[in-house]
Amino acid sequence: MLMFSFTLLFQCFIPALVWSMMVDVKTSSGEHGASETCAELVNHGTHFGVEIEVGSPGQKFDVVADTGSNTLIIPSCLCMVEGACNKEDRCFTGGHNRSSTFKLSKGPNNGPMPMYLYFGSGPISGVKAMDVVRVGEMKHYMEEGIMLMTDHALQFSMSFEGILGLGLPEVVEEKSSTEAGSMDDAASGQIVNEPPHDDAALSKIIRDVVTGGSAIENDINVQAVRHADPKHEEIMRKILGNAESVGSSNGTGKSLSLAAVRQLPARVPGFLEQAGVNRFSMCFNDQSSGVLRLGLPNLLDGHGSVGSEHWGVGFHGISVGTSLLPLRMCSTADMESGQETPCGAIPDSGTTMITGPRAQLALLFEAICDSWPRCKDNHTALVGAAEAATVAAAKEYGGVDPFNIRLGREAKEVVLKLVLSDCARWLGEGKGLQELPDLHFHVAGKQGTAQTLSLPGASYILETHSQQGHLTKASLPSDAAANLSTKCLPAFEQMEYPTLKNGPVWIFGTPLFYEYQVAYDMGTTPPSLSFASVAQTPCGSCNKQTNLATSDVSTDATQALKRPRWLPGAPRQPRIDINRPL
């Protein structure tokens, strides 16, 4: 059996002295007696990022703070070399003495351990590594691993330097030695001539392997062979120190990926989970930085998470404006046998918009128009014009209307979006965005706790530029923007995410985090969430000298309420697999 030779780049053995230095970890109050700390969240418009340091000395990255995923991911410089990552972004190099604490996790044949993560928008591949990571003043040696990304199938419209996964820790069943197979058997490549799988099956297999799902052993073997494409093999060959072929174990062309996936760890715990920090919170500020608080005391008024794979709450519909009755959606009366909540909701800091199913969004848009006089009046005028046109056509064509002009219920949604797109004309009039009705989202926890989360118009309307009717994909210099028209749009997007236990699942993206401090506790059973309105508990800021959060109120936030929030580029989409349960 071929044993791969490592270059000095990957032969990193950590001295005892260095190891002792790495166990310098601040953890939450009550666990090791350490005090609360914080990290600044940088406002990128479509999402918020947090600066982290990886390695010794630390290499800095501006990563997405994402409560929708649970892995720390940073791009390897090999990703740039292969053209899979933006060469203008920063990337990580552990070898060549760049980090004295860097070490690759060993996989089959003493090679690096490959990792495959499946997001709703595509897979990411890379290798599992260990090193020191610092978030704010909290430092931890990630002995259970981080992911060095070497390739991906995701679409990024802006800079991307990684993800700090703050999602719900996954509960996975340990595989038996029989299910996993031995490394020697896997490397021998006995099963290679299986029929090919289609892309959908391949995606499922990758997903099941990563999450500890139910893929059978033969499927894992087939997946390994199929995934070992030349580009991936070449990346792995370079990582292994120019071994002659990642795909040959004995000259027969059998794939190392076969062994890699057979031995693939079910998951890699996130930063906070590895550091032993149970509680954290996030909140955003308009036109300024937000705050990630780490090591919080016990949460007050927490809601038990209803999600098994994501932070989630039960969702019982929306009421609009002064109406006390929720819209006809997400009702307990419509629940089917075995369903635990009528709908579900994931508070996801890494998603720009609020997403929901098309049919329910249509009801919401109709209700907003009915509760907003400017929209309602325009719709009434449209109906009057349509009726007048029908009468005129009938007179012209002998009592028959050949055009059959009819306005359906979707007309209110069309009028709402047209009026919003014309916001440059009316934003300076009267109350501006305060004309729009507040939206009230009714949520509940596992044990029946309930809360109403309210968003004013300024929170669910966004402003951007358009050029010849099309939204611009990125922010522009002021001289270029002067030739464009200002448009507004609702901060909602369609996403169908049906589940058996929790019904249709919504994603509560960045608008929620501007109005609430969202706190998370991994130490309760089940894990819990809480929502504190920033009107009573201001988001504040993170003092860079003390790394403690303050509760001062930004004057910029008050000014920002006069206009919608600016959307500088394409909205960041959820990194959530909609084929999985909540």
Image (cartoon, helix red, strand yellow):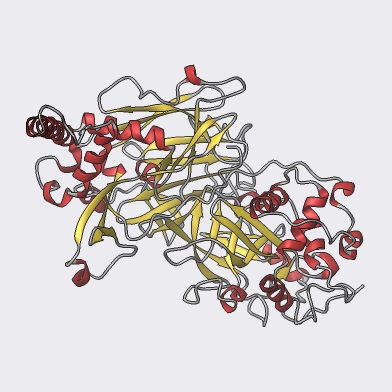
Could you tell whether 155 is left or right of 269 in the image? left
Query: At 72% from the left edge and 72% from the top edge, which residue is drawn?
Result: 233
Q: Quadrant of the N terminus?
A: bottom right
Q: Nearer the viewer, residue 496 or 388?
A: 388
Could you tell whether 405 is left or right of 282 in the image? left
Q: Nearer the viewer, residue 457 or 480?
A: 480
Quadrant position of residue 235:
bottom right
Quadrant position of residue 391:
top left
Residue 23 visible within the image: yes
Quadrant position of residue 524:
top right
Could you tell whether 271 is left or right of 471 in the image? right
Q: Quadrant of the C terminus?
A: top right
Residue 120: % across, % down: 55, 50
Q: Nearer the viewer, residue 83 or 18?
A: 83
Residue 183: % across, % down: 88, 60
Residue 438 visible within the image: no
Using the image, determine if residue 396 lies above or below residue 558.
above
Q: Nearer the viewer, residue 268 or 472?
A: 472
Residue 157: % across, % down: 42, 64
Query: Total of numbered circles in the picture?
Result: 0
Q: Residue furthest front?
A: 398
Q: Residue furthest top?
A: 333
Query: At 91% from the left edge and 62% from the top edge, which residue is drawn?
Result: 184
Using the image, determine if residue 582 lies above or below residue 234.
above
Residue 43: % across, % down: 37, 58
